[in-house]
Image (cartoon, grey):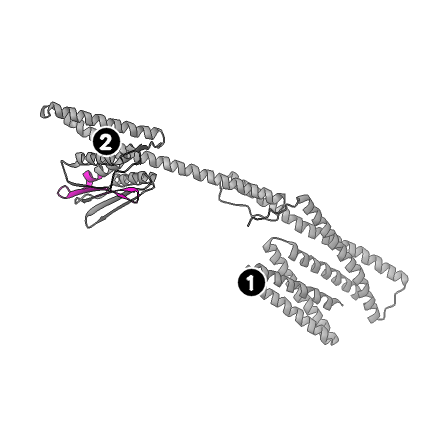
Amino acid sequence: MTEKPRRRRKLTHELLGLVCLCLVLSFLLYLFITTFGRVLIEEHCFQNDIVMDEFDWYDVDNTLRGVGFAVSAVFFTIMFFALFGERLAYIRKITAGVEILRDGNYGKRVELRGRNELTELAEAVNYLSESEQKLKEKEKRLYKEREELIRTLSHDIRTPLTSIMSYTELLNQKETLTAEEQKEYLSLVAKKTEQIKKLTDILLDGGHREPSFFEDARLLFEQLAAEFEGELEDDFALLTAFSYARAFSGNFDVEELRRIFDNLISNVKKYAEPSASVELSISQKDGGIVIRQSNRIANNKPPSESYKMGLYSIRRIAQNYGGTVEAHDENGTFEIIITLSNI
Amino acid sequence: MLTSLDLLIIVFMALAAVTLLSLCLMFLIRNKTASKVFFYIASALGLYVSWIGFRIGIGGLFPFQIAIGVLTALMCVGAFVLERVSKGNEKAFMIARFISAAALVIGFFNAIF
């Protein structure tokens, strides 16, 4: 049901009505005093056997009229100022509301009274206050999001940077490397540098995403899994499993997926027990993709801020795909399940 | 020197003006606190005029006037109690105001005439 728009009353009409009301009431009081005052005096004279002539009654009537008029005038003044003062107090309340708004306190609202121009003014002040509050909140949220983006991307840039540092260190020991190995390491350095460039581009673009359609996304995930294996196979026993019913397609931002895998690799390197196996499985579920990774946690390796940032980064990326991230460690085993739903 | 007739007229006029004023402001003022204040004034005034009516009734041995005096006093107390227990209930406060107003008007006429 739609609410009927309230009919607005003009403030001038309201004030005029107020004056008329006070005048009518004052006149009624005047009539009451003069009429019943006379009755009262007649009754008093009758009970006390007082006889008054025509001139005496003329004086009584005149006195009653004069005093009645004075009392009615006082009554009118008090009534008018009491009722008018209430409107004035409301104007003061609205002014106070504007002052509060000017001081930047946007949570306060002016109480709505009546339905005249003052009510509209109060509504306008409240609307302004509400819009300012929403604007401030939006600004705050955007600033927070930007901060988070910078933090997560800065963290994610560190992973390929660490790889570059490791490879350059290896390349420095030229005498122990074959020409083929040197070429391979240089190619890896170039690849990681390209990755850093893309990440910094995202940073400069303010988190702009570029998802592409993959006809056979299975190949993309197999490639990422192969990179995962390539990074860790020297230090860990790996168990990788794919369980797709068939080839699948979808929209993916390769850089985002790479960041997920880089974070997983980084966490394995930092916290996994080398003697135990590291498991990675990629499967399909309800039209989405589920990436599950688990490993034994190495002793004396408490989770650091970097670990939390890595998880946070993965969570943010999963949210871009309408997905979720579940991470838990039980009995010394860490497990993370990343679901990418809207692909 | 003021005669008894002068005093009677002064009391009558003052009571009439204050009664009408408190009754009007009790119903017309929108501010809740001010409205409550005028309600208490009206109730207190109602009790006062009830007492005057009761005193006149006792002095002149008028049982009807005594009964009206007691009744209006009870109405004022009832209205006051209702307002205290209503705890912000607008409807109950409105009923309390009407009871108080009725008691004040009846008590006024009972005391003066």
At label 2, counting other C-alpha atoms closer than 10 Å, the crowd grade (few under 14, some 14-19, many 20 or more) is many
In the rendered image, the quadrant that contains the C terminus of chain A is top left
Image position of B15 (left or right of A274): right
Residue beneath the point at 80% across and 59% down: A34
Residue B1 in view of the camera: no
Q: Nearer the viewer, mark 2 or mark 1?
A: 2
Position of residue A51 relative to residue A303, above or below, is below
Residue B27 in view of the camera: yes
Which quadrant of the structure image shows residue A319? top left
* Element assignment for label 2: helix
Position of residue B27 relative to residue A4, above or below, is below
Which quadrant of the structure image shows residue A293? top left
Image position of A310 (left or right of A2): left
Which quadrant of the structure image shows residue B18? bottom right
Residue beneath the point at 84% across and 70% down: A46
Question: Which residue is at the front of the view, A203 or A259?
Answer: A259
Image position of A283 (left or right of A145): left
- Outermost residue toward the left in this view: A176
The part of the chain drawn in magenta is A267-293
What amino acid is labelled 2 in the image? Pro
Image position of A223 (left or right of A52): left
What is the x, y in percent for residue A132? 49, 39
**Picture disc at residue A160:** 2
Residue that mark 1 sits on:
B86
- Outermost residue toward the front in this view: A246
Residue beneath the point at 22% across and 25% down: A190
What amino acid is labelled 1 in the image? Ser
Q: CA distance from mark 2 to mark 1?
A: 72 Å
